Amino acid sequence: MSAVPQNQPAAATNDPDTQETREWMDALSAVIGAEGGERAHFLLEQLIDQARQAGIDVPFSANTAYVNTIPTDQEERCPGNIEIEERLRAYMRWNAMAMVVKANRHNPEDGGDLGGHIGSFASLAHMFGAGFNHFWHAENENHGGDCLYIQGHVSPGVYARAYMEGRLTEEQLLNFRQEVDGKGLSSYPHPKLMPEFWQFPTVSMGLGPLMAIYQARFLKYLHARGIANTENRKVWVFCGDGEMDEPESLGAIGLAARENLDNLIFVINCNLQRLDGPVRGNSKIVQELEGEFRGSGWNVIKLLWGSGWDALLARDKDGALRKLMMETLDGDYQSFKANDGAYVRKHFFGRDPRTLEMVAKMSDDDIWNLKRGGHDPQKVYAAYHKAVNHKGQPTVLLIKTVKGFGMGKVGEGKNTVHQTKKLIDEDIKAFRDRFNIPIPDSELPKLPFYKPADDTPEMRYLHERRKALGGYLPKRRAKADESFTVPSLETFKAVLEPTAEGREISTTQAYVRFLTQLLRDQAIGPRVVPILVDEARTFGMEGLFRQVGIYNPAGQNYTPVDKDQVMYYREDKAGQILQEGINEAGGMSSWIAAATSYSTSNRIMIPFYVYYSMFGFQRIGDLAWAAGDMQARGFLLGGTSGRTTLNGEGLQHEDGHSHILAGTIPNCISYDPTFAHEVGVIMQHGLKRMVEKQENVFYYLTLLNENYPMPGLKAGTEEQIIKGMYLLEEGQGAAGAPRVNLLGSGTILRESQFARQLLAQDWGVAANVWSCPSFNELARDGQDAERFNLLHPTATPKVPFVAQQLQPHIGPVVASTDYMKNYADQIRAFIPRGRSFKVLGTDGFGRSDFRSKLREHFEINRHYIVVAALRALADEGAVPTTVVAEAIAKYGIKADKINPLYA
């Protein structure tokens, strides 16, 4: 800290004893000058503590003055060539603008509006320049690489830089947002669409900040466990001030401080505008965010004013300018930058005669050129330098900018700037002149991209700076260099064999047995990342506490209450479990960090995240889509799944739709297994795909807390299990007896098994029972066959796997699951022609009761399956319709009750 200015005003507006106040202020200045800021801070804290102990109410304030945190005399000087960097920024600004405008002039008969954003990159070009030129390390033999969560709307600026670096071609720039033909650039950061370029998807706002915090924590986890050296890596997160209104943006900042994530740097672009207007027109977003972050334990650095303000602030002996800065509202600051210097003189400095006098000798242009801090390359460098060298806390940089900086009348500081994607020739000329782009008037109608010759000082400097930092960014690793061999299926025989007579287990227990066995594997075991959200005991996983420990960077500094028990709660600096507390979004963010570690850290990790299935895709669906975009690999386990298995818990705990949501994510492979052997086969196959083959898929399995005997694996059915359907029990009946096929998954498959017995016993019907672990995979297979047949009319038609399985087995088909009817109904088109197809499901709100009552309520129990089977047979003329009525009466079914969908 620098010394307090000698004429700093008293804090109180009406000071009854200015002399005494001056003596205290002089004393503080003397301490700072002689012993430094830390000593002064200690003394102030002691004074405040003593005042509170004396009963004096000293309100806490996490805010500081509305000025730069770093005093001018303590700024680290930028070692680069600021003039060359300014020219490079100008060229990138031009190319980013040209890319967006060209895209929206192209092909007007096809709509003409491809969108894109000019204003966002315009506001933070200086911040990106400082990072790329001086701070952001690429992955190389000496550095694991920094992680960049780039604000999604600035992608044109990043493409413009990559074009200058020779990493993207002019043809690609001309195809901005035109990707279908394979030549274009994605609208925003999308790893799926540009798998060797973008690392993290960030335009679903709020998710970037949340995922980045857990990414930074996961880097610490890898280091603590000795898997990768990550101590010199940083996670940089760019956000807009409007984005911080997303609950996810601030939702985990407490975790970042609690775990001392000093590898994490947030850069919040405070241009005071969100998409439609001011973020906080009636207050100050910078001060609000400072309070949020400082109160949560972060190191906060504010960069508000450029170098042009330094002289004015040095002359501000009575604090009038500082007071004016603090009192001016964000809505007014926005108006200042949407007008001109004369407006600023009158409506800002003119509010106080003392401040008006301070600028009396300045021209209107001089006043207009008083920049905000985010547009001052020296001050941005100093702020970054301070951030990367801070230890023990995460850092947030609150950097004030102007949205649309340099766009002039068309957008600078205006509410409409976010939507500005077209410029007229006059605006383009003004942009050219503002940034001194060497393009003559004659060429302006063509809106050409500009790139200096390779041997120019600018281009040499551009490449030299990235060479010094290890290479070019952003860059994504598509596959890890390391490889593993997955244990054979036989390794997991504990879940493949039938349960002993009189023994029952659940599929959740089968999963735990599988995981426990995998952890014992010397090669792969250490790469397993069990992730829990405070439900380990629910899922029978508490044994892992003692076995592999819970990760805590501080270790365990207390004696756990259950220390005398075998499975006590053990935290460890090198613990393997990530225990996220009651926090599904955090659990999913940790899972994403682990599931993409092959890319971000060149380390294959295998995350297993288990949670209540109801609190999965519907709660973290946006994160699941982000995981798909990021090409995540790992296992999601939805425990206590289905709408009728979690008896007693009620509506918001009962999942009847997670598989429908999972099926919407193209690279999510989902299964609803009934038996332990299915769990084993599916998970071992998933390991082979994701770990051995490094395929970009992830798996979702639903698990049950319902115990029953397990039949064991029938040799030869493994491939059919993976494809989604195999014959579990063949129907037995007299020659010529009516036949039917009962399909099911999860717990309701067992109701189909009981229905098979009733059909044979009560109605003389032979029923085949088919286990269908994945209606989603069956549907995808069928859709693929249909597409092939549509586009290859002369080729031998493909037959959907469902039809292949059912074709040799005559009779109608009845599908029953613990999910909404849509889940099983999606295979209707692939049932062999001429077969009746009935679907039972759990549409409607869940409720509390015993399983048997819930299955009766939702009309999916064995009796309803029998009735549906008989009705399907009647529809085909195999039995009289009266038989259906007899069954309804026999089983006491209330035919006139309210449909459970509306009940």
Image (cartoon, helix red, strand yellow):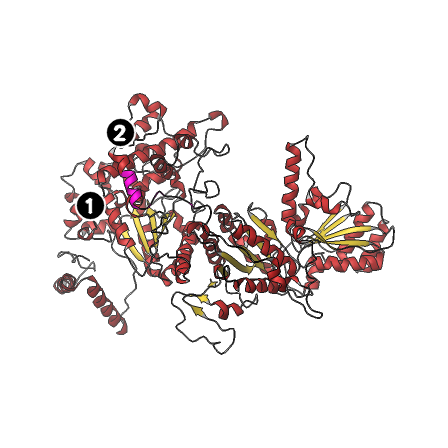
Contact between labelled residues 2 and 1, with CB atoms less than 8 Å apart: no
Residue under numbered circle 1:
309
Front residue of 792 and 71: 792
**Kind of residue sitting beneath label 2:** Asp
Say which mark, if any, is on residue 246.
none
The kind of secondary structure element at disc 1 is helix
**Range of magenta residues:** 461-477
Task: Work out whether mark 1 precedes mark 2 in sequence or the reverse, and give the earlier one.
Answer: 1
Say which mark, if any, is on residue 433.
2
Q: How far, Cα to Cα, is label 1 from label 2?
A: 25 Å
The quadrant holding residue 116 is: top left
Give above or below for 378 relative to 861.
above
Task: Assess disc 1: are there few (<14), some (14-19) or many (≥20) residues with their C-alpha within 10 Å of its C-alpha.
Answer: some
Check if residue 465 falls in the magenta segment.
yes
As drawn, the residue found furthest toward the right would be 735
Q: Is residue 284 visible?
A: no
Quarter in which the C terminus is drawn = bottom right
Front residue of 692 and 105: 692
Task: Assess disc 2: are there few (<14), some (14-19) or many (≥20) residues with their C-alpha within 10 Å of its C-alpha.
Answer: few
**Kind of residue sitting beneath label 1:** Trp
